[in-house]
Amino acid sequence: MTAEATKETREKEPVEREAFLNVFLRNLWSSNSVTITVLSIVLAVIIGAVLIVVSDSTVLEKFTYFTARPADALDASWTLISSAYSDLLKGALGDPEAFNAWFSGTGTWQDAFAPLSETLTYAAPLVFTGLSVSLAFRGGLFNIGAQGQAVLGCIAAGVAGFTFGLPIVLNLLVALIAGALGGALWGFLPGLLKARTGAHEVITTIMLNYTAGLFLAWLVIQKGIQQPGRTDAISKVVADSAQLPSFGGVLRVNLGIVLAVLVTAGVAWLLNRSAFGFELRAVGANPHAAKTAGISVAKTYTLLMAVAGGLAGLGGATQVLGTAYALTPSVAGNIGFDGLLVALLGRNRPWGTLLAALLFGVLRAGGNRMQSFTGISLELVNVLQALIVIFIAAPALVKAIFQLRAARTTAKG
Amino acid sequence: MARSYAADLRPTESVGEQWKEGVLRPVRGKRIVAILAAGGLTLAAAACGDAPEDTPSGSASSAATAAAYKACMVTDTGGIDDKSFNASAWAGIQAAKAEASNVDPKYVSSSSEADYEPGLRNFVSQKCDYILAVGGLMGDATKKVATESASSQFAIVDSSSSGANVYPMQFATQQAAFLAGYLAAGYSKSGKVGTYGGLKIAPVTIFMDGFADGVAYYNQKKGKTVQVLGWDKAKQNGTFADSFIDQNKGKTITQTLVSQGADVVLPVAGGTGLGTAQVAKDSSGKVSVIWVDQDGCKSAAQYCDVFLSTVVKNVEEAVKESVVKGAKGEKLSATPGYIGTLENDGVSLAPYNQFDSKVDATLKTEIDQLKKDIIAGTVKAESASAPK
């Protein structure tokens, strides 16, 4: 919308230079998706600030004598909120002090870039699971099973990583492919069930999530999988040659994020340029019409779920080969379910999903520092994530709060 | 949009076309103002307290902070209020603060395993004097960060040491569980005792190993055939709830054990075990429970009347001691570290509490003697899961 308007204005530029600014501002303050997203984040941050104050008893105490000396309460609140959010940013993007130390020679460049590395480390698996959910959604399927598919990806990649002992590069490739195949299998099953029997994919994928989780918990304590010399639930360590290359030390960021960007490009191409992408979008828009037009809905569903599962499986593989290096019952963490939120926030578009995953990476990495330095509970990060997604899912609410114009206002608006 | 607001606010009025934005806005505005005013008044009433006198931040506090000993703890994914070792470890740090006032406690919880490394690193960059990792699964992350930051002092619960600057705290829980097995076998009238675990992991099965051995020792000594349901030490296999919080699961499993004849049950499953306590309570005295970790009459006091005793694993005391030691400037040496045994009260059998009069006096003396024998090494309490 904005782009179109800009182009329009540019043609008449010599005559109506003033109008350009007007059009630009009007479109900026209309309910297009970028504005809604930004405002959702702003709203979530504001509500988060209130929660930060409410959750801190010493600051709250100062509010009991607010009328007598308001400055106390306001000062304390401001100090707390600003330190919390600045720690969030420092922990996610970089601490100016660390950069100063680097430039003046007292610190290392590793320390300066560590926060950014954390952000990218947390974001990489979420890109994959997010893409898995978005792609399935574009084909009209609600893939709640990204978690289970990611767990299967973890298992397959992990087991391949410590079993085969292949030479360098090849070992990593095999482990990654195994991860993708593991996830694809876990996506293929509900896809097939949906295509053949009409079983609803939401139900089947949720059930497969449980199955995958319990299978992993059982598998890690079996002989041949469990780490020798350990009695707790942890598997052997993935061979060095199968680990995603990283800088090591403080910098945990690994090749996973590069793969994530490449795969995002791949999914974007698949969705918008390939025949299969066209078919899946047609099926997603209207399966009956697609069938009439000669597209096999059953085949599309099955293939789509297998591809979506493969993407989530790659997410699990990056987790094991990139950061964890060994299987434990909760090695996949929450990446599958967070993938649902990422996809929603990215509006089911590949590049949007990538950006959303980066934002979640920022929140997670920054949240660690915020919890550690300011003492704000890590749960606040979950609340922020949830609030952002709630506002995104309810654009009418954001529109009403900020009194945005409708997106399709014409010049006369 | 506006019309639906009107419907919410004035449900009795019909919402017709005449409700235009212009008519509606002032009504909505006034309502909002009224609500804000009411809320503001309430807040203002609450905010009428007197401001405290300004206290100049005196020399006393700065003297304390000068020698502050920052004790920082990273929980595992169980969180700070898991009613198990995370909670115990944190209680230990708090207790250390009561003893040595220069201790400055701090913690972060991990929401996933990927948070272990950044959690530990953040504490290194905050220059914590004592960084505690809770749980064996944090072993690898602790090793990695401890190697990078050789000048920081680390400690870990339930794991062996992984470097000169990591102080390990482990527990020979099977020794105390051995006593509990003997007690259960001696106390049981049906000749069957039961146990089950939360998950098949070493910190859980070590209790079950010791318990089964204690029963076996009782049988051998007395020529009885008391049976253990729910755990086979030789096969390392048994009944598990797959949960540390699901009380209903605990109830179901316990009912099964009871229907098979067990009248003393040892649940090694955190909050799941409360279901067992409930079954015991409903049985009006037929079934009794041996609790784990912390004395049941303190940690789950509402069920005190069904707790025969408790297999205590004193994480709290171990953590407290190490922090106090560190705060006094003593060195925490990685080898041998700390191993909680019956001898140093790192593990123990809790008092019988309300069962004191019900447990046979000879059984009590036998258990006291057994404790001495285990300490002396004449009776061996062993487990595959025991710390080495």
Image (tube, rainbow, N blue to C red):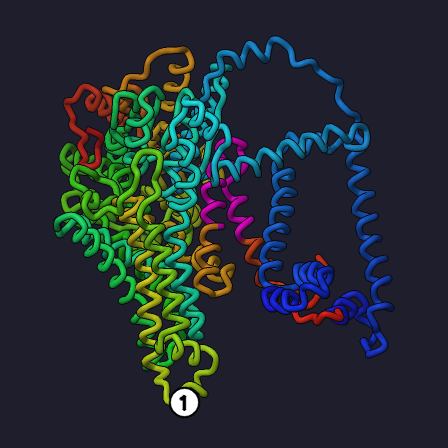
Residue A364 lies in the magenta stretch: yes
Question: Can you see residue B283?
Answer: no
The chain identifier of the residue carrying mark 1 reads A
What main secondary structure does the magenta stretch of the protein show? Answer: helix
Q: Compare residues A377 and B311 and report the one nearer the observer.
A: A377
Rendered image quadrant of residue A409: bottom right
Q: Compare residues B255 and B26 and report the one nearer the observer.
A: B26
Of all residues shown, which one is farthest toward the bottom?
A: A292
The residue drawn where x is 65% and y is 14% is: B57
The residue drawn where x is 71% and y is 57% is: A402
Q: Is residue A55 left or right of residue B307?
A: right
Residue B62 percent across, percent down from the top left: 57, 12
Rendered image quadrant of residue A404: bottom right
Of all residues shown, which one is farthest toward the front?
A: A14
Q: Compare residues B76 and A378 and report the one nearer the observer.
A: A378
Number of residues whose C-alpha sits closer than 10 Å to that of mark 1, classed few (under 14), some (14–19) or many (20 or more): few
Residue A52 higher or lower than A70, as above or below: below
What is the span of residues highlighted in magenta in the rendered image?
A359-385
Residue B388 lies in the magenta stretch: no
Residue B362 higher or lower than A206, as above or below: above
Quadrant of the frame with the C terminus of chain A:
bottom right
Residue B181 percent across, percent down from the top left: 25, 36
Residue B13 percent across, percent down from the top left: 84, 73
Question: Can you see residue A266?
Answer: yes
Figure label count: 1
Q: Is residue B365 left or right of residue A171?
A: right
Q: Disc 1 marks which amino acid?
A: Ala
Q: Is residue A245 left or right of residue A194?
A: left
Residue B254 percent across, percent down from the top left: 34, 51
The residue drawn where x is 75% and y is 29% is: A71
Q: Is residue A293 left or right of residue A159?
A: right
Per the image, the residue denoted by label 1 is A293
